[in-house]
Image (cartoon, rainbow, N blue to C red):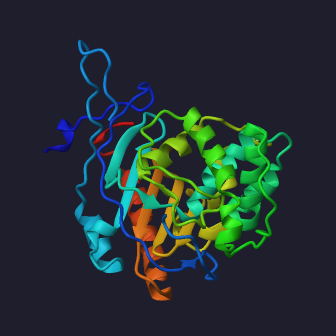
């Protein structure tokens, strides 16, 4: 099927979207966070139209076709394992879907979870420190993320979580400690879902930092969260949400990646075996004008340091390819989000 013939229902104007689904991968392994510290995680434990006279909503369809350059990069950095990654790129201005691959496949979030935690705290917790949330996102501080998901649950539903010793910055807590955060995370995620219209099928968030192996979203759901955060404008001490994230070649966990594209990528990393992820915003300068895009990349990698480094190199190469491409031409959109 040619891309121009694909159908896509706008997730902005529709309150009910039926999304195509894929089977989840079976994950095993230990957490290897952005700083290389080994930490254990927790294992994974169609609406019907009531009015028969109306047309059912069209199925949301996206392309799973890779460009040659993308396949070449997968061969170089990911052993050609085409089933083990997903991505989505959306033009922030007109919501055109520019590139998509397995965007409905639920993937383990790892520390990308902190995007949801941060926006929930910023929007609900009175007096929340923007500078501390910014530091939490840029350095991927697990202890701070745990604190903020609990504060968000208190502000949203007046729920006080059991006490926890989860204060370590870059490792994950025990199962016992992490389970004490489950209800807080569910309250936070329920608030997220109440704010954003998209099909939340198979979506789960079980903690604030991303240490739980049961945290799964797909790329479409993540992009909708990024879009929601972006719509708040410069609401956080004069900063837009993207400025709270790691900046390529500048700071945070992506400071040493895409250094040749310094200041063009604002993103949250996520590493929890076997996933290495990146989600956020990138810019491409075309015709003297900066064009903004939302993006998500999920890579399901092998275990080990070499595999982790290769996964990050794969993501870096994809971003470099996309930014350079969109700096030269707009390309044909797949659909509209």
121, 188: nearer the viewer: 188
Task: Give the total number of marks visible in the rendering.
Answer: 0
Residue that appears at 24% across and 16% down = 52
Q: Position of residue 281 (x, y in %)?
A: 53, 51
- Dividing the picture into quarters, in which one does residue 191 lie? top right
Quarter of the image containing the C terminus? top left
The single residue placed furthest to the left in the displayed view is 1
- Dividing the picture into quarters, in which one does residue 205 lie? bottom right
The answer to whether residue 293 of the structure is visible from this angle is no
Q: Is residue 268 left or right of residue 325?
A: right
The single residue placed furthest to the right in the displayed view is 127
- Dividing the picture into quarters, in which one does residue 143 lie? bottom right
Q: Is residue 81 left or right of residue 138?
A: left
Q: Position of residue 229 (x, y in %)?
A: 61, 41
Q: Position of residue 61 (x, y in %)?
A: 27, 41
Q: Position of residue 175 (x, y in %)?
A: 64, 71
The answer to whether residue 273 of the structure is visible from this angle is yes
Residue that appears at 43% across and 80% down = 310
Vertical arrangement, residue 254 with respect to residue 204, above or below: below
Q: Is residue 128 left or right of residue 224?
A: right
Quarter of the image containing the N terminus? top left
């Amino acid at each position: 099927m040619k891309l121009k013939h694909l159908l896509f229902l706008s997730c902005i104007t529709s309150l009910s979207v039926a999304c195509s689904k894929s089977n989840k991968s079976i994950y095993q392994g230990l957490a290897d966070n952005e700083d290389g510290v080994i930490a254990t995680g927790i294992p994974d434990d169609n609406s019907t139209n009531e009015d028969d006279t109306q047309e059912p909503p069209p199925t949301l369809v996206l392309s799973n076709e890779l460009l040659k350059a993308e396949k070449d990069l997968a061969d170089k950095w990911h052993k050609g394992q085409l089933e083990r990654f997903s991505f989505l790129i959306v033009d922030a201005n007109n919501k055109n879907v520019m590139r998509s691959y397995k965007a409905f496949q639920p993937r383990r979030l790892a520390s990308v979870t902190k995007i949801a935690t941060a926006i929930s705290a910023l929007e609900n917790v009175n007096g929340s420190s923007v500078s501390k949330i910014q530091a939490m996102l840029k350095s991927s501080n697990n202890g701070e993320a745990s604190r903020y998901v609990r504060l968000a649950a208190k502000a949203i539903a007046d729920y006080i979580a059991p006490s926890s010793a989860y204060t370590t910055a870059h490792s994950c807590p025990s199962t016992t400690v992490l389970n004490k955060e489950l209800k807080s995370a569910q309250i936070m995620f329920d608030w997220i879902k109440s704010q954003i219209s998209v099909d939340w099928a198979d979506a789960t968030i079980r903690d604030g930092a991303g240490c739980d192996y049961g945290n799964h979203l797909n790329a479409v759901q993540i992009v909708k969260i990024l879009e929601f955060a972006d719509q708040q404008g410069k609401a956080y001490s004069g900063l837009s949400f993207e400025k709270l994230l790691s900046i390529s070649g500048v700071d945070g966990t992506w400071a040493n990646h895409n250094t040749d594209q310094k200041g063009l990528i604002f993103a949250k990393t996520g590493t929890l075996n076997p996933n290495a992820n990146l989600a956020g915003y990138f810019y491409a300068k075309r015709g003297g004008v900066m064009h903004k895009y939302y993006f998500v990349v999920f890579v399901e990698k092998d275990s080990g340091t070499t595999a982790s480094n290769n996964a990050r190199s794969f993501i870096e190469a994809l971003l470099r390819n996309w930014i350079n491409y969109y700096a030269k031409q707009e390309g044909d959109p797949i659909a509209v989000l």
